[in-house]
Amino acid sequence: MSQQLTPVLLELADAAPRDHDNGGVLRRLTDHSRKLPGVEATAVLSVDERNKNTPTVAAASDHASDQLAHAQLELKEGPGLEALRTGRRLADLPLDGPTFRSRWPHFVPRSLSEGFTGITVIPLRHQHRTIAALQLHHQHCQHHALPGESVRAAQAMCDAAVIGVAHQRQQRYVDQLQSALTSRIAIEQAKGMLAERFEWTIDEAFELLRSYARSHNTRLNDLVRSILDGPATEGPFRRASPP
């Protein structure tokens, strides 16, 4: 399995150039982990940092796993939510036993009704925080349990996916800094242009730019770009025509 696993790990860890958000990495994580021996379906719960760190369903391999993932959010209970909260792995749990029936009294019957008697959940942790949890739906009985090699492979996939997510976050941060720098340079250029055109100070030019943008419900960057790209004889700050 190790030879087959290597390209999968590289793909998950190096996903940033192809994806615009974490969903691409996590969708591939569900796709690849679904192919592990003994695994019948997969899903990922993740933390939505843009919405007060609320849990959300990031990806699912099929309708049944998607329904079970959403059921946990609806019921506010289940192994995926527990792994998100505690950051601890839950391996090869027998859902048809009394322990887990009492632990998740509403989730377990739904899982059993979908035909899954066992579940394994692996948290994805980044910088000491749990950012997602991979759920592996499978069978658990006296003669059938999730192979240990599948759990180890799924853990390796999760570790690689964390690297991919971290790359994406870093790239977004770099892109934001670059955008802010580009915007600042353009604003400085526009301020200098207007200061020279109308014999204003730099501060006066910026205040008039900002006031115009606010009063006309226009983004400052759009206004600045129109000044830099447009002719000096047109626009809201056009040069006066010679008499």
Image: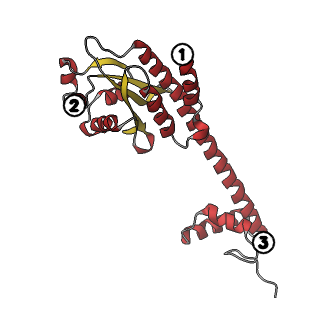
Taking the image as shown, residue 65 lies to the left or right of residue 95, namely: right
Mark nearer the N terminus (2 vs 1):
1
Kind of residue indicated by mark 2: Ser
Name the foreground residue: 133 vs 229. 133
Secondary structure type for disc 2: helix
Q: Position of residue 213 (x, y in %)?
A: 59, 67
Callout 3–callout 2 Cβ contact below 8 Å: no
Q: Nearer the viewer, mark 3 or mark 2?
A: 2
Mark sitting on residue 113: 2
Mark sitting on residue 197: 3
Q: Position of residue 112 (x, y in %)?
A: 23, 27
Taking the image as shown, residue 36 lies to the left or right of residue 117, namely: right
Quadrant containing the C terminus in the rendered view: bottom right
Kind of residue indicated by mark 1: Ser
Q: Callout 3: 10 Å neighbours few (<14), some, many (20+)?
A: some
Name the foreground residue: 138 vs 218. 138
Looking at this view, name the residue that lies furthest to the top: 143
Q: CA distance from mark 2 to mark 1?
A: 34 Å
Q: Is residue 41 above or below residue 179?
A: above
Q: Which residue is mark 1?
A: 2
Q: Callout 2: 10 Å neighbours few (<14), some, many (20+)?
A: few
Residue 233: quarter of image: bottom right
